[in-house]
Image (tube, rainbow, N blue to C red):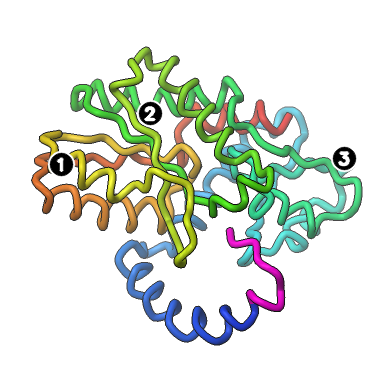
Amino acid sequence: MVQLPRWLWLPLLYGFILRTRPKKSARKYAAIWTPQGSPLAVHTKQQTLLLGKALAERSIKVACAMRYGRPTIQEGLKQLADCGELVVVPLYPQFSRSTTESIRDVLPPGMKMIEQFHDHPAYIAALAAGVQRHWTAHGKAKLVMSFHGLPKRSVEQGDPYQAQCIATAKILAGTLRIAPADYLITFQSRFGAAEWLQPYTEPTLIELARSGTARVDVICPGFVSDCLETLEEIAIEARRSFLQSGGKEFHALACLNEAPEWIVALGKIAA
């Protein structure tokens, strides 16, 4: 997520980040770990299995890979070596050079890749279906749409990420038929001293609680699978901050995960 010159980034990485961050991350991961392993890996594998079943009648094979983990992208491509045309679908709905484009960097030249699906009707419909299910069970509340953050400098240099996040939020709000006063767009996962996209999620939630908002529902449209950023940063840390600041009820809505609407959407996006 941080785009800095190599000469500046490497000393920060090896002199500071790798000396302090692993211990902190380990504690956070321990809070969300499941018997099956990392929630992100578990959900991604299940999505792969379900999508493969959905596309089997069209003789389309599906494999999953991780940009910074196992199986690697190259390992995933090898699983499909006997196929004809390959399509790579980065599971980042909103395009950013630091995420989506980083996948392009490790693909063979000319391989087809879906750049983004931030406004794809099936993706929006899947998000809306999850919110509607939650509201049917719990009633409506203030909706906070929290996206992963990005250094403001990246947007100033032309990255379309922020504009696509805002577009996703507005289209989703329109689909849900909620007024601008009924939802907020925020950005989470800030890192370092530089200014990132604002408003920041946790300070916004604290302010909402202090100003008398009793309940909030938080959805993370930029994540298609629950992971550290949604399960620990939002469902644990942000919840604690909201309640300690005077809020009464906090709901972290599940990501798309294995929702039937999302598997259908994935098929439409990929095909």
Look at the image and give the residue range highlighted in magenta. 1-9
Mark 1 / mark 2, whichever is N-terminal: 2
* 215 in relation to 207, above or below: above
SS assignment at label 3: loop
Please say if 204 is above or below 4: above
Task: Using the numbered discs, state the Cα–Cα distance from disc 3 to disc 2 in whole angstroms.
Answer: 33 Å
Q: Split into 4 quadrants, where in the image is the N terminus? A: bottom right
Which picture quadrant has residue 15?
bottom right
User: As displayed, is residue 107 above or below residue 119?
Assistant: below
Q: Amino acid at mark 3?
A: Glu
Residue drawn 58% across the image and 84% down it:
14
| Of residues 216 and 194, the one drawn nearer to the viewer in this rendering | 194
Front residue (pair 225, 229): 229
Front disc: 1 or 2: 1
Residue 208 point in image, percent of width and height: 20, 39
Residue 56: image x %, image y %? Answer: 70, 34
Circle 2 SS class:
helix
The amino acid pointed to by label 2 is Gly
Disc nearer the start of the sequence (3/2): 3
Is residue 8 shown left or right of residue 107?
left
Q: Quadrant of the C terminus?
A: top right
Identify the residue under disc 3: 85
In the figure, 210 relative to 16: above or below? above
Question: Disc 3, disc 2: CB below 8 Å?
Answer: no
**What label sits on residue 130 in the rendered view?**
2
CA gap, disc 1 and disc 2: 24 Å
Q: Earlier in the sequence, mark 1 or mark 3?
A: 3
Residue carrying label 1: 209
**Side (left or right) of 89 relative to 78:** left
Q: Are marks 1 and 2 in contact (CB under 8 Å)?
A: no
Q: Looking at the image, which is closer to me, 105 or 69?
A: 105
Q: Residue at x 70, y 33 (%)?
A: 270
